[in-house]
């Protein structure tokens, strides 16, 4: 039904930013990564990612997206609050919506098709209105399409990924078919376009204040001009719609098209007819669903419809008018309820539902009766199977349902109403009209309902303006019954003339606006002048098309009209008195055939307006519009004013003779047609019996396949999502494997992995120095591989570690004499039953050599230190340490491993006048620099208790290593005393 955004924010929300919801399914992972890679992290919006996730698989989307954005990412939990610059992910197996500023989670039913993107988009649009953005990315099916319509109706922004770029184009194409998408771009450009939309001045407020988009005078003139363009292009006068509603929709288009003022937008509309059509479509945006407001439809099904069916018999017809029906869901919902009640009551009267809307496009969609798979979430499985065919990704209504409904374009504010309706529904349309327009519409609805008939309105609508004409059935659910107090419907004086927009008042501002409004005024003046001339001098006339339907009225036709009960019709035989119908039809038929002017004799007919009888002469004159359109003008001339001398006629006819000839010709044609039809019927009856049997089998098979196909589609969506995550995880594992292999090569440690059966799973390149391995040995038992160790029990060590789950360390020797530290460790994969052993072999031969050298040095009585080239002490023996500790000399205590021996000698030289220290410093320095091969010196180092002499030897270390030196101090006190 007709809906425009007219929501009122009830309170200042806690969350004041935009909510950007991204709907993605199969192939959507890459699109999401690309989107967030190009999205700024500080735009002040909350991001919500909605996917089809299976409850049987853990989602790793958080880990995958975190590599492409610096924003915080959270998997939603019940009651979680929205935050700016934050990404929220739907948890697996859940359906998510908004309750205020908090997330509401419900479990997804495994037996019903659930559309989580539609559900969240709808919820988001109701809460955040024009502060929400819907993004449709890669995916199959149509999830998100209905939700996008709701976002657009609320004033939000809708964007979609370019279908040719998407891995699966089902969802982008489906939302494009709704015609509510504001931008279609490659995914790497979507984020920037959303940022531009949010930054637009029109987006900063719910409504643009007067003068913000131009001066108030220019704004008013631009809005009048826009309304004129809309009327001229579509015939709908939006002056009848609430100004705030109209302004809000225009503001949204100004924001989307990124123009600076209403006047500029008006200029754009004059040049861009596509934008004009888009604006008209958004003003008439259709937000509806099957059984919308389920409680109200339940009340209709349990109170009103059973009563209507009970009062009808097999020969009567139940007449229903569904006004503002939009894309037909409401009309089909009513038909389903009636058919179900027919079966329950075992009564099958005729049913005719007249479904109308002012928008021709949505009427055509409704008449086609084809809907996306989103309707599966609105209808029960039983109703889907009974009333719909499953065709691909859509549902089509069955003939049983379609044949009950007549769809037609109808303007509730200007077109005549239907009559004698048992039930009239008009839900969520009146609330968008101004009060005076609401009154006009209600008068039409009231007139259409027979006394005792029922009116069904939307939850926000009332009957206050015509309350005396109705009684309450259920005021809460807006069900009312017409009584006998209803006022008769009066056709407005200009109802039989073409409708024109009034241009009174003029416009003085924008020249472009003035030119359009001026053209409208000129056209109005001509129309009024022509109307006056016709009323004064021309006879009352009707312009008729080839099908004998009236297309225009001239003059006062009231004496020649007779309104009959039933559906509204413009057929000549339905609007003229019975006595005039045969003559008029004969004249029209012959004039159309011979294409010449014809005139009848005087005809007496009953006229309630001017006495019992009146005379009239009918004249039919051909009117050539163009080569493809020929019309006939039927004139009603009074004999009193008719002057035969002034009218040149091409001929006249004898009505009786023409009628008799016409009847004979038709009877001959009818006889031949009956004979041919009878033969055809007999052939078809034989074929039909065979086809019916085949059709029943096919229908049964088709229903089974439809049910299976729906389940498979749902599973396929989830599997595609899981597969995309796993592919990303595999890529990550491949990178980790490369990193691990590279690290193993760089470290150079021999490593072997075996599983619980001691089968080789992988090994490092250095492992070939221990085991005689080749690249193809992965998968072989380790015991089949020979090794180079003098350790025959190595397999027993592996088995012991596997059984005890304890780490084992041993030093083992190779056949070449190298020493290795063997470490055997147990491992287990946390979320799997996989377990095994990893063994590393570290070459410790150099460490053992160093230990052996240290032991040799410690066994000597001399005080020995090994210096590096810069004088740093690399090693000292035990005697050196004991001498330093025994003498407690600060200088000696600083000559330990890591200190610089040259620096120590340099400081002693500066603090002492003893030339011995200077000689020692120069000697050590010379040897380290390579200027002398060795240095020797005898010096005295007395203690308080004794006199001591030492000989100092410094020798150069030669070899592949860098230069260094060995310093030794030997106590020769005893030899010196003997000498």
Image: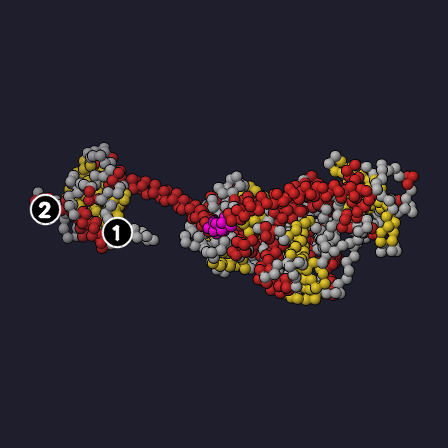
Q: Residue at x 21, y 46 (%)?
A: 821
Out of 956 and 952, give the one closest to the viewer: 956
Q: Residue at x 49, y 49 (%)?
A: 697
- State which quadrant residue 596 falls in: top right
Q: Closer to the camera: disc 2 or disc 1?
A: 1
Label total for image: 2
Residue 630 in the image: x percent, y percent?
A: 76, 38
Label disc, if present, on residue 826 of the rendered structure: 1
Residue 370 in the image: x percent, y percent?
A: 58, 48
Stretch in magenta: 696-709
- State which quadrant residue 964 falls in: top left
Answer whether residue 701 is magenta in the image. yes
- Disc 2 to disc 1, C-alpha distance: 61 Å
Answer whether residue 690 is magenta in the image. no
Tell me if 315 is positioned left or right of 572 in this view. Answer: left
Out of 648 and 897, give the one closest to the viewer: 648
Q: Residue at x 68, y 41 (%)?
A: 672
Asked which secondary structure carries label 2, the reply is helix
Tell me if 551 is positioned left or right of 388 in this view. Answer: right
Label disc, if present, on residue 974 of the rendered structure: 2
Out of 119 and 30, give the one closest to the viewer: 119
């Amino acid at each position: 039904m007709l809906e425009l955004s007219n929501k009122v924010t009830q309170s200042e929300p806690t969350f004041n930013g935009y909510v950007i919801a991204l709907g993605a399914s199969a192939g959507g992972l890459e699109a999401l990564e690309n989107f967030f890679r190009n999205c700024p992290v500080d735009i002040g919006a909350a991001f919500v990612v909605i996917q089809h996730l299976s409850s049987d698989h853990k989602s790793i989307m958080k880990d995958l997206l975190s590599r492409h954005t610096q924003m915080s990412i959270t998997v939603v939990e019940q009651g979680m609050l929205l935050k700016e610059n934050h990404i929220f992910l739907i948890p697996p197996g859940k359906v998510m919506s908004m309750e205020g500023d908090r997330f509401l989670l419900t479990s997804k039913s495994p037996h019903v098709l659930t559309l989580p993107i539609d559900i969240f988009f709808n919820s988001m649009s109701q809460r955040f209105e024009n502060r929400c953005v819907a993004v449709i990315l890669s995916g199959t099916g149509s999830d998100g399409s209905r939700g996008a319509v709701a976002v657009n109706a609320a004033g939000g922004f809708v964007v979609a990924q370019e279908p040719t770029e998407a891995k699966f184009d089902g969802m982008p194409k489906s939302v494009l078919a709704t015609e509510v998408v504001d931008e279609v771009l490659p995914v790497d450009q979507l984020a920037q376009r959303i940022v531009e939309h949010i930054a637009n001045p029109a987006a900063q407020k719910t409504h643009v204040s007067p003068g913000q988009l131009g001066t108030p005078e220019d704004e008013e003139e631009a809005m009048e001009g826009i309304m004129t363009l809309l009327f001229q292009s579509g015939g709908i006068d939006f002056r009848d719609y609430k100004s705030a509603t109209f302004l809000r929709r225009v503001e949204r288009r100004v924001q989307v098209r990124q123009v600076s003022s209403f006047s500029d937008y008006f200029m754009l509309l004059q040049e861009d007819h596509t934008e004009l059509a888009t604006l008209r479509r958004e003003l008439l945006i259709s937000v509806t669903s099957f059984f919308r407001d389920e409680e109200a439809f339940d009340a209709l099904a349990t109170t009103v419809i059973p009563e209507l069916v009970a009062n009808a018999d097999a020969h009567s017809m139940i007449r229903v008018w569904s006004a503002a029906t939009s894309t037909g869901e409401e009309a089909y919902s009513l038909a389903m309820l009636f058919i179900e009640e027919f079966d329950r009551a075992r009564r099958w009267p005729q049913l005719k539902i007249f479904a109308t809307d002012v928008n021709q496009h949505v009427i055509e969609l409704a008449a086609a009766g084809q809907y996306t798979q989103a309707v599966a979430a609105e209808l029960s499985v039983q109703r889907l199977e009974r009333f719909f065919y499953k065709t691909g990704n859509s549902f089509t209504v069955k003939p049983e349902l379609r044949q009950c409904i007549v769809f037609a374009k109808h303007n509730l504010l200007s077109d005549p109403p239907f009559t004698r309706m048992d039930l009239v529904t008009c839900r969520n349309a009146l609330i968008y009209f101004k009060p005076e327009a609401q009154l006009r519409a209600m008068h039409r609805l009231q007139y259409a309902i027979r006394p005792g008939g029922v009116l069904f309105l939307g939850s926000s609508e009332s009957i206050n303006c015509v309350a005396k004409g109705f009684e309450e059935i259920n005021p809460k659910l807006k069900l009312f019954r017409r009584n006998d107090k209803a006022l008769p419907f009066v056709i407005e004086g200009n109802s039989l003339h073409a409708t024109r927009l009034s241009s009174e008042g003029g416009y003085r501002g924008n020249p472009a606006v003035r030119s359009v409004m001026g053209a409208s005024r000129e056209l109005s003046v001509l129309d009024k002048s022509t109307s006056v001339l016709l009323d004064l001098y021309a006879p009352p006339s009707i312009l008729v098309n080839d099908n004998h339907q009236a297309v225009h009225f001239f003059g006062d036709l009231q004496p020649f009209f007779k309104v009959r009960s039933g559906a509204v019709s413009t057929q000549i035989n339905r609007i003229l008195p019975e006595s005039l119908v045969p003559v008029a039809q004969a004249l029209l038929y012959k004039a159309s055939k011979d294409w010449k002017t014809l005139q009848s004799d005087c005809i007496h007919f009953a006229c309630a307006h001017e006495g019992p009888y009146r005379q009239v002469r009918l004249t039919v004159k051909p009117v050539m519009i163009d080569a493809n359109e020929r019309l006939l003008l039927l004139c009603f001339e009074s004999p009193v004013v008719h002057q035969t001398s002034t009218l040149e006629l091409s001929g006249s006819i004898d009505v009786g003779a023409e009628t008799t000839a016409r009847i004979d010709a038709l009877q001959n044609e009818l006889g031949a047609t009956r004979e041919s039809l009878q033969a055809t019927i007999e052939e078809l009856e034989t074929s039909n019996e065979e086809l019916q049997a085949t059709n029943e089998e096919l229908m049964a098979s088709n229903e089974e396949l439809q049910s299976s196909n729906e389940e498979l589609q749902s599973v396929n969506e989830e599997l595609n999502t899981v597969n995309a995550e796993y592919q990303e995880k595999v890529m990550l594992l491949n990178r980790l494997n490369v990193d691990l292999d590279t690290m193993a090569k760089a470290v150079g440690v021999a490593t072997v992995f075996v599983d619980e059966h001691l089968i080789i799973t992988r090994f490092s390149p250095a492992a070939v120095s221990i085991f005689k391995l080749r690249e193809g040995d992965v998968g072989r038992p380790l015991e089949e591989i020979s090794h180079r160790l003098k350790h025959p029990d190595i397999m027993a060590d592996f088995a012991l570690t596997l059984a005890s789950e304890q780490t084992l360390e041993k030093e083992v020797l190779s056949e070449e004499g190298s020493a290795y530290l063997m470490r055997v460790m147990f491992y287990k994969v946390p979320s799997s039953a996989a377990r095994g052993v990893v063994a590393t072999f570290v070459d410790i031969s150099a460490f053992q050599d160093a230990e052996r050298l240290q032991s040799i040095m410690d066994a000597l009585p001399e005080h020995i230190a090994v210096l590096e080239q810069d004088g740093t002490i690399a090693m000292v023996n035990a005697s050196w340490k004991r001498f330093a500790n025994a003498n407690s000399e600060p200088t000696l205590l600083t000559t330990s491993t890591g200190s610089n021996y040259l620096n120590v000698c340099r400081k002693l030289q500066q603090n002492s006048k003893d030339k011995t220290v200077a000689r020692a410093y120069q000697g050590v320095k010379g040897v380290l620099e390579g200027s002398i091969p060795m240095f020797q010196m005898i010096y005295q180092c007395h203690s308080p208790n004794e006199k001591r002499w030492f000989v100092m030897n410094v020798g150069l270390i030669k070899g592949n290593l860098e230069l260094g030196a060995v310093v030794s101090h030997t106590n020769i006190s005893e030899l010196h005393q003997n000498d």
